Amino acid sequence: MKKIVILGGGFGGLYVATELEKCLAADRDVEVTLVNRENFFLFTPMLHEVAASDLDLSNIVNPVRKLLRRVHFFAADVEAADVVRKKVTVSHGTDHHHHELDYDYLVIALGSITNFFNLPGLEERALTMKSLGDAIHLRNRLIAFLEEADTECASEVRQPLMTFVVAGGGFAGVETIAGINDFVREALKFYPNLSRDVVRMVLVHPGQVILPELGEKLGSYAQKKLAARGVEIRVNTKVTGVSDAAVELSDGTMIRAKTLVWTAGTSPNMLLAKLPCKKDRGRLHVNEYLEVTDWPGVWALGDCANVPDLTTGQYCPPTAQHALREGKVVAQNIAAEIRGGKKKAFSFATIGQLAAIGRRTGVARILGVNFSGFIAWFLWRTIYLSKLPRFEKKLRVALDWTLDLLFTKDLVQFETFRARTVSHEETAFMEELTGVEVQPRTKASVA
Ligand SMILES: Cc1cc2nc3c(=O)[nH]c(=O)nc-3n(C[C@H](O)[C@H](O)[C@H](O)COP(=O)(O)OP(=O)(O)OC[C@H]3O[C@@H](n4cnc5c(N)ncnc54)[C@H](O)[C@@H]3O)c2cc1C
């Protein structure tokens, strides 16, 4: 029995698993296990739509078990990988107990993590936009602050409550500010004490123009559109710190704000640091077959690997479109190793890049051609909808988008705390008052 263990069930890891199901469908003597922290696959390009209440939160995630048939799935945390002993340590369960998984082939697709560059106050206070939890958290924050700012007693803090700063003018930052700007401004009509002038949205970007990957023309277009909708864009500026009272910028400006969303830095997963493998800026060094240099049988891809780009001579950018294609090549190459076939070099030129910038407008560069406005937004929706796995989720997203044309965005918070229960004092008080002993069932119904 040959054992393949895949670490990470994002774009890279999931596509390795699905392709292995195809390539090795006839091989009963191969066992494939996918380990991922969450039991779902997150479609990150639509994350900002959850934060901005455009989509229901479960519509952009797919249960891994519904995507795979033959591959075993293990919902667990990867704690360590020992590439000398060919063992991976994982923990799971409420008590976080450990297991060791043996492997013959190891695939590392653990993605990246947010990097705050040790800037003061960021780790404790900044929100991030990487996980489903991050998007829900941001959405809850927007609604909680709208509720608080609308009250009479909040007049002193109304301005900082209604000021939202997003750091980073890349895809994640621009789509996030565009989405939350539309959401908050649209919600104002339900909050009688809040006017348009009290809302302040600031996008802080270190470069000259936002969305540098799309070129100056589209970046300037996006900047103009966002500015016209009330987003303040601070180019050539960086966030240098955040406190409870304000966000500090590199030009000395202090913005009185209670929300900072940080999308301005990532680092490879910290687990990689412990591996004795060659790395470039923390990412695993792989050859054109996506095999980790000097470690036969270990493969790496996606955001945690430095994949040589045979079309440009540089390295592949950390995008979903690269990770999923790398996944297919890794699976085919592992199958070739097992069956003694020829390995395939990874070669892929970016087809296009798209960003939704709110109010049915977008920017896109596809095969070198620039698109902007409604057409780019339509392309964004059509292309990403087609990429979202499973028909059920596609249908749910399409329905959400259609209903969005008829109804306003939802303002319900997704709170996850436990419902109130009866305290000892309250039980005693009720018993004293009524003279009757409170039964457990009564106690529950009072709660
Ligand atoms: C907000 C946002 C928007 C984006 N939009 C686009 C876009 O429009 N187009 C595009 O091409 N790219 C986009 N990207 C980039 C794209 O999401 C990444 O390049 C892609 O996800 C990389 O795939 P990956 O498999 O390397 O990592 P990921 O997809 O991040 O997967 C890593 C997986 O490993 C798991 N994991 C990590 N550590 C552990 C551990 N210790 N134990 C267990 N599991 C672990 C994670 O939970 C995750 O499931 C976006 C990214 C973000 C954050």
Image (cartoon, grey):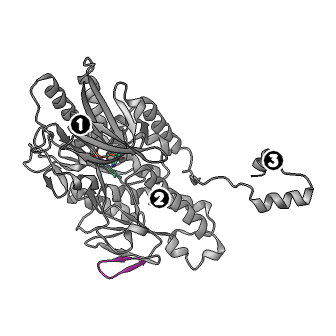
In the picture as drawn, the residue positioned furthest to the top comes out as 26
The front one of 326 and 226 is: 326
Disc 1 designates what residue? 327
Q: Is residue 65 magenta?
A: no
Dot in front, 1 or 3: 3
How far from the left and from the top, in percent, is residue 280?
A: 14, 55
Where is 29 relative to 5, above or below?
above
How far from the left and from the top, in percent, is residue 251?
A: 29, 80
In the picture as drawn, the residue positioned furthest to the right comes out as 435
Q: Secondary structure at mark 2?
A: helix
| Residue type, mark 1 in image | Gly
Disc 3 designates what residue? 442
| Residue type, mark 2 in image | Leu
The front one of 74 and 164 is: 74
Which residue lies at the image location 82% right of the left edge and 47% below the top edge?
A: 439
Task: Tell me the quadrant of the picture where the N terminus can be found.
Answer: top left
Q: Is residue 301 left or right of residue 234?
A: left
How far from the left and from the top, in percent, is residue 434?
A: 92, 56
Mark 1 residue CB less than 8 A from any atom of ligand 1: yes
